[in-house]
Image: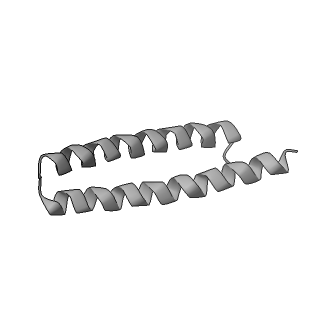
């Protein structure tokens, strides 16, 4: 079972990846890079966003259980 701290650390890591990917997409878009590349990065970003949301819910549930 994961601890609340390890989940929080993982969440921060995913949020950092998401932010970095967003910046990368913006740069590629501004430089008119391949649409396929940008599309793939957007899919990756969306996948990360879903994982972040699921992790936030799990952390919230663990916090509620601790009350």
Q: Percent position (x, y) of residue 53?
A: 56, 56
Image x and y of residue 3, in percent: 69, 42
| Residue 10 in the figure: left or right of residue 36 | right
- Image coordinates of residue 32 in percent, x first then y, are 11, 52
**Closer to the camera, 1 or 29?**
29
Q: Residue furthest right?
A: 67
Residue drawn at 16 percent across, 61 percent down: 35
Instruction: State whether residue 38 is above or below residue 19.
Output: below
> Residue 58 location, x and y as percent?
67, 54
- Judge by depth and name the residue closer to the eye, 44 or 30: 30
Left or right placement of residue 29 versus residue 56 in this view: left
Residue depicted at 40% across the width and 60% down the height: 46
Q: Which residue is drawn at 31% across and 58% down?
A: 42
Which quarter of the figure has residue 45? bottom left
| Rendered image quadrant of residue 67 | top right
What is the basis of the colouring in this image?
one colour
The residue drawn where x is 21% and y is 43% is 27
């Amino acid at each position: 079972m994961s601890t609340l701290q390890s989940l929080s650390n993982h969440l921060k890591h995913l949020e950092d990846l998401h932010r970095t990917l967003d910046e990368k997409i913006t740069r590629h878009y501004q430089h008119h890079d391949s649409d396929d590349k940008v599309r793939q990065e957007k899919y990756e970003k969306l996948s990360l966003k879903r994982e972040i949301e699921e992790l936030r819910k799990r952390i919230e549930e663990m916090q509620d259980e601790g009350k």
